[in-house]
Image (cartoon, rainbow, N blue to C red):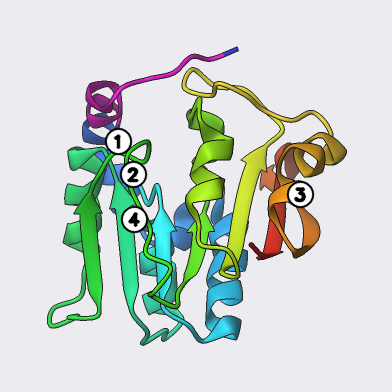
Amino acid sequence: MGKLRDASWYNAHFKKKKLFYSKPPSASTVYPLYRDSAQWVINLNLPVTDVGCGPGILYAELRERGFGGRYKGVDFSSEALSIAESLKRSGDNKCSFVNADLESIIFSPKVRTSYVICETLEHLEHDVELIQKIPFGSPLWISVPNFDVASHVRHFKEQQSAVERYGKFFQTFSVNSIPIVFRGKEFHRYYVIAGMR
């Protein structure tokens, strides 16, 4: 099992992989995850807050698909946010990136927005507390993996385990399983829960 990592660890990671993360989202092995989350946001036609946005992969995919709504990305890695800022289109005043610790962030219930937490919960000790901060009645899309890496504090071997941990924080939701394929073979899977907080 991996372990909790701090911002300096993620800064070193993103600095080392900067060239990789600067490529179009479709070049990533986890592209199906961002393709599906972007489509969910577009179908809602609401502003989106990308919680744990990392290097801005969701932002890049949304803009690639013509999403013109407001986007706010939040992350605690300054290096990841630097990559995300470099992807920002000139004159895109509907996009903002915020450097913030997800443990102390507060989301305003007065702002009607959708929330995406993609490739983030598995890195946090206080994952449940983060979901509880999302305003009740907000559209929410989350993903969690079925595999372990150095920075995962948890993963879910079965889809049902993810539903048992997070489903109770949704009024209504649907569940999906997204396979990640490399060289024609599935090597990982993400479980997605999407619905109304």
Residue 62: x, y in percent? 43, 74
- Magenta span of residues: 2-13
Sequence-first tag of 1 and 4:
1
**Element at label 2:** helix
The residue tagged 4 is 23
Report the disc number at residue 167. 3
| Above-or-below relation of 29 to 87 | above
Residue, far left: 91
**Element at label 1:** loop
Q: How far is mark 3 from mark 1, CA to CA?
A: 33 Å
Front residue of 28/116: it is 116
The residue tagged 1 is 17
Report the disc number at residue 20. 2
Looking at the rendering, in which quadrant would you find the N terminus?
A: top right
Crowding at dot 3, Cα within 10 Å, few <14 / some 14-19 / many 20+, comes out as some
Q: Residue at x 69, y 62 (%)?
A: 194
Q: How many marks?
A: 4
Crowding at dot 1, Cα within 10 Å, few <14 / some 14-19 / many 20+, comes out as few
Q: Residue at x 28, y 21 (%)?
A: 9
Q: Are marks 2 and 1 in contact (CB under 8 Å)?
A: yes
